Image: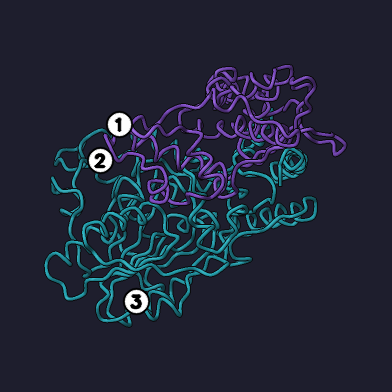
Chain colours: A purple, B cyan
């Protein structure tokens, strides 16, 4: 069976980050300024991120991931990209940017890459919270999902995260999403499911 | 790099003797349904294979029809049941288990969506069908009971003789998906009192795309694949001569090797199990401790995810399978393991080693050297 291990299921970059993860949190002595953890066991992946911040720059980051190869490689790549970034740059990191640097992931594996940046944002939120500062980045990256009612992805995320909306009906009751033109309904459902997964609701 | 194939419950390497037998079919290219010499030669080879299969499961030759595999055999039986219900049978219920192969689970899901009544018997922590629950589901409204002989994921073997007698006591027909059992365990359709039995060639070192269905003389039958008069009208389509010959040869070999292989595989499986348990902490062995296919070992590693373990092993030349959701692209891990009450985290961390005729002791030793550092590493990476 010559060469059959060369043509692997994922890109060479994914393989490298899976086999040799960078910036792994395997040292208990790592002192973090901000900490974030997202994911759920039900879906089989969970991520934990700690950041060190100096002058609003991420000077160091450590992470741990329980999950599949895509999840491990995504978090590892995220760590490589983020160290040296300003908090604002880091906050704007998207799953698409991570998967691009990984040389792509199969379609059905894309959801495995969405936790890395969420854990990072949770760590930045935690850092700012500990500093008693408002989050100046949050507003900028918010995307309007329901145009009629002006509901953003952040609003939906917040309602799921704080368990104010645990069902799609509760979310509709609170936000009135999709009650006018209705074209956002599918997108809202998708986001709602994604956030439920991320925040283990 | 050394390669070790431990995914024999998914499919097996075709035996050399089987390939040779199939190669010999090259000249028998006539259509077995034709009367001329070319056709007669093909027909002779097919009937020889039918006899080899019948011998393996203790049936008469004419109780065997060839199909494209286990899935078609299973579908044929459920189609018969559906047909009987449609024709006005007073028995309208099908009873099966919660851990059947998708060939049955998905067929049942479809039948339910069309308004048919299906009930599922749960299994206990070892994967054995709960006979007390089965007893309660059985009655004069049950048309068909279908319970697999051995499970593909855990290897747990059901007490088929007992279950078939329970099914018959209430007047139901009994089918068993014996795809994982045939060729590995002694299966005798008369001793086990079976009405229909599905088997598949590629699970015991035969070719893919060929299987058989045993149909006891006198039980209801309706062709699933309709068309020509092949198989006495029981399964249409030109005979797959090479496949059938390969299946027959695989059956002959399985029967010849069965006793020795059973002992050898169980010893290797037990070596693997004991040493994994002694070298790696937090390991759970899934399935029944001894009523288990001889070459199947399903274990869960806490704090390590199955797809990651599978791929780390793959990078070391070792092929296994996992019940983790991530390996399939769905969000749900193995329904078989969850049905046994396994924690969802442990289902995500499950690995199935399935051994076959070509597995050696050196293979197992290589796995035992390779596995512990992989689990240790993944646990270092893990949040749990």
Q: Mark 2 or mark 3, which is nearer the start of the sequence?
A: 2
- Residues flagged by tags 3 and 2 on a common chain: yes
Dot 3 surroundings within 10 Å: few (below 14), some, or many (20 or more)? many
Image quarter of the N terminus of chain B: top right
Residue B334 vs B219, above or below: the answer is above
- Name the mark nearer the viewer: 3 or 1: 3
A51 or B132, which lies in front?
A51
Residue at point 78% right, 34% down? A25
Residue B29 vs B296, above or below: the answer is above
Circle 1 sits in a helix, a strand or a loop, which is it? helix
Residue assigned mark 1: B27
Give the label on residue B41, or none.
2
Residue at point 33% right, 38% down? A185
**CA separation, marks 3 and 2?**
42 Å
**Picture quadrant where residue B215 is located:** bottom left
Give the chain letter at badge 1.
B
Do tag 1 and tag 2 residues touch (Cβ < 8 Å)?
A: yes
- On screen, residue B233 versus residue B57, left or right, reads left
Q: Mark 1 or mark 3, which is nearer the start of the sequence?
A: 1
Dot 2 surroundings within 10 Å: few (below 14), some, or many (20 or more)? some
Residue A109 vs B376, above or below: the answer is above
Residue assigned mark 3: B167
Give the chain letter at badge 2.
B
Residue most toward the right? A29
- On screen, residue B341 versus residue B65, left or right, reads right
Residue B346 on image: x %, y %: 62, 54
Dot 1 surroundings within 10 Å: few (below 14), some, or many (20 or more)? few
- Name the mark nearer the viewer: 3 or 2: 3
**Residue B353 makes an appearance in the image:** no
- On screen, residue B151 versus residue B305, left or right, reads left
Residue B313 on image: x %, y %: 66, 37
């Amino acid at each position: 069976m010559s060469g059959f291990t060369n043509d692997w299921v994922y890109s060479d970059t994914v393989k490298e980050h899976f086999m040799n993860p960078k910036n792994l949190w395997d040292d208990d002595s790592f002192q973090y300024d901000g900490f974030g953890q997202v994911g759920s066991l039900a879906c089989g992946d969970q991520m934990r991120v700690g950041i060190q911040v100096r002058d609003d720059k991420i000077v160091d980051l450590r992470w741990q991931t329980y999950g599949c190869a895509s999840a491990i490689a995504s978090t590892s790549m995220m760590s490589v990209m983020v160290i040296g970034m300003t908090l604002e740059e880091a906050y704007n990191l998207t799953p698409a940017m991570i998967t691009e640097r990984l040389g792509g992931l199969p379609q059905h594996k894309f959801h495995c890459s969405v936790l890395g940046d969420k854990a990072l944002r949770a760590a930045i939120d935690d850092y700012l919270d500990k500093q008693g500062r408002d989050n100046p980045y949050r507003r900028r990256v918010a995307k309007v999902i329901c145009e009629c009612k002006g509901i953003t992805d952040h609003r939906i995320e917040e309602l799921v995260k704080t368990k104010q909306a645990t069902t799609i009906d509760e979310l509709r009751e609170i936000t009135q999403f999709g009650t006018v033109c209705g074209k956002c309904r599918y997108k809202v459902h998708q986001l709602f499911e994604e956030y439920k997964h991320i925040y283990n609701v | 790099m050394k390669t070790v194939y431990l995914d024999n419950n998914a499919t097996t390497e075709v035996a050399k003797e089987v390939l040779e037998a199939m190669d010999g079919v090259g000249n028998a290219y006539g259509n077995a349904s034709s009367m001329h010499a070319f056709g007669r030669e093909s027909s002779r080879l097919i009937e020889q294979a039918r006899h080899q299969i019948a011998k393996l499961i203790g049936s008469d030759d004419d109780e065997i029809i060839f199909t494209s595999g286990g899935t078609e055999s299973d579908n044929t039986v459920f189609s018969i049941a559906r047909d009987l219900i449609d024709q006005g049978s007073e028995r309208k219920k099908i009873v099966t288990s919660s851990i059947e192969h998708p060939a049955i689970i998905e067929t049942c899901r479809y039948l339910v969506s069309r308004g048919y009544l299906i009930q599922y018997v749960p299994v206990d922590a070892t994967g054995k069908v709960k006979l007390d629950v089965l007893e309660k589901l059985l009655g004069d409204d049950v048309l068909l009971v279908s319970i697999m002989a051995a499970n593909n994921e855990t290897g747990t073997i059901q007490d088929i003789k007992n279950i078939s007698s329970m099914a018959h006591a209430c007047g139901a027909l009994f089918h068993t998906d014996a795809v994982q059992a045939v060729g590995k365990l002694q299966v005798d359709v008369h001793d086990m009192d079976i009405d229909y039995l599905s088997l598949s060639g590629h699970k015991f070192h035969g070719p893919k795309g060929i299987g058989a269905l045993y149909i006891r003389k006198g039980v209801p039958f309706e062709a699933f694949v309709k068309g020509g008069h092949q198989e006495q009208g029981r399964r249409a389509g030109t005979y797959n001569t090479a496949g059938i010959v390969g299946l027959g040869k695989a059956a002959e070999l399985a029967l010849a090797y069965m006793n020795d292989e059973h002992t050898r595989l169980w010893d290797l499986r037990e070596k693997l199990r004991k040493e994994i348990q002694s070298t790696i902490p937090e390991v759970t062995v899934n399935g029944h401790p001894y009523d288990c296919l001889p070459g199947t070992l399903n274990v869960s590693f806490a704090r390590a995810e199955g797809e990651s373990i599978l791929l780390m092993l793959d990078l070391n030349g070792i092929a296994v399978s996992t019940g983790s959701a991530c390996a399939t692209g769905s969000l749900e891990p193995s329904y078989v393991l969850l049905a046994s009450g396994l924690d969802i985290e442990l289902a995500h961390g499950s690995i199935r080693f399935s051994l076959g005729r070509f597995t050696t002791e050196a293979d197992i030793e290589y796995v035992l050297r390779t596995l512990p550092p992989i689990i240790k590493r993944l646990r270092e990476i893990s949040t749990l």
